[in-house]
Image (spheres, helix red, strand yellow):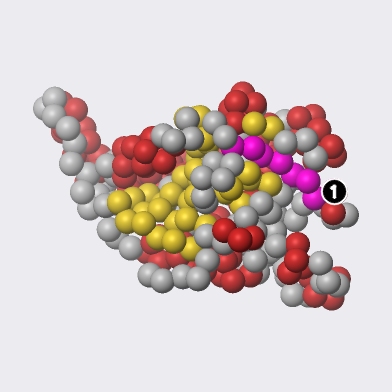
């Protein structure tokens, strides 16, 4: 696949989508987000791909939405045109695991896009921030919603109201990222994690992702019921038969095509 603002790398069952607008510090514009949606949907539908990795460059994941593109927008341009909603949230419809890998800056819309991933892995060079108040607007892609759900109300208020950036170590302490690695090793480590997941049953990985996401949309009782339906249904799948047989036979399971 050839894109103007993305680079694609294939690693067996893992595919890497790299944001690539270096002159604009990977600022998120309509073309990039349209291309990202196209790539995500294609790989989600590709049976040879089990895990998607989303990353930027060594210096920046994404510095935010493209202010140069939106500076002259009016309310009539944004609300009726569904700015952000029309093409930023395709990632939320992807059923396979999406791992975000952040090196350098993830600011504003870049931080919000990172938070839409299922797991976040950070280089020790990563910095996260929501500086929208400094340019006279609120966050518009989940900064006031996903951030407090992830790190808590008061830490989120601090970042949102003061524009304070946090580094990778603080992001890990706050629960914003899963793991932190040295910058020169982060992609190697991320691919190892992605390949580990890709070696499991893709159908079970999708069910786990769906169940965890449901936890944020419903009560605990309903969430557990939802989870248990998946658990019960699993006993009618090849993945369960292979996984439990492999355990009892003391061998590695083969989840290919399961």
Residue 148, position as x, y percentages in the image: 72, 37
Q: Is residue 174 left or right of residue 182?
A: right
Q: Residues within 10 Å of mark 1 (few under 14, many from 20)?
A: some
Where on the picture, by quarter, is residue 163? top right
Residue 214, position as x, y percentages in the image: 56, 44
10 in relation to 2, above or below: above
Where on the picture, by quarter, is residue 243? top left
Where on the picture, by quarter, is residue 252? top left
Looking at the rendering, the stretch of residues picked out in magenta corresponds to 126-133
Residue 234 appears in the rendering: no
Residue 123 appears in the rendering: yes
Residue at disc 1, secondary structure: helix
Residue 177, position as x, y percentages in the image: 56, 34
Look at the image and say whether residue 234 sits in the magenta stretch: no
The residue where tag 1 is placed is 133
Residue found at x 81% / y 33%: 158
Q: Is residue 221 left or right of residue 186?
A: right
Please state which of residues 69 and 222 is positioned toward the viewer in this rendering: 69
Look at the image and say whether residue 131 sits in the magenta stretch: yes
Q: Quarter holding the N terminus?
A: bottom left
Residue found at x 76% / y 30%: 155
Residue found at x 80% / y 75%: 77
Q: Is residue 54 left or right of residue 1?
A: right
Residue found at x 58% / y 48%: 60
């Amino acid at each position: 696949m050839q894109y103007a603002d993305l680079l694609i790398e294939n690693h067996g069952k893992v595919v890497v989508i790299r944001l690539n607008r270096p002159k604009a510090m990977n600022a998120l514009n309509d073309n990039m987000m349209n291309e990202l949606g196209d790539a995500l949907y294609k790989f989600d539908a590709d049976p040879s791909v089990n895990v998607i990795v989303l990353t930027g460059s060594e210096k920046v994941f994404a510095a935010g939405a493209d202010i140069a593109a939106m500076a002259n927008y009016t309310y009539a341009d944004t609300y009726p045109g569904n700015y952000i909603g029309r093409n930023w949230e395709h990632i939320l419809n992807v059923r396979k695991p999406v791992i975000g890998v952040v090196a350098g800056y993830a600011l504003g819309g870049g931080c919000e896009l990172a938070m839409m991933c299922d797991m976040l892995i950070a280089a020790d060079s990563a910095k996260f921030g929501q500086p929208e108040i400094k340019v006279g607007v609120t966050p518009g892609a989940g900064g006031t919603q996903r951030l407090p759900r992830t790190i808590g109300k008061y830490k989120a208020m601090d970042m949102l109201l003061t524009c304070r950036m946090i580094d990778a170590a603080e992001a890990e302490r706050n629960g914003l990222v899963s793991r932190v690695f040295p910058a020169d090793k982060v992609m190697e480590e991320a691919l190892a994690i992605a390949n580990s997941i890709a070696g499991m049953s893709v159908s079970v990985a999708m069910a786990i992702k769906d169940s965890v996401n449901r936890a944020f949309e419903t009560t605990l009782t309903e969430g557990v019921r939802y989870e248990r339906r998946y658990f019960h249904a699993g006993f009618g799948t090849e993945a369960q038969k292979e996984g439990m047989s492999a355990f009892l036979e003391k061998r590695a399971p083969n989840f290919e095509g399961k």
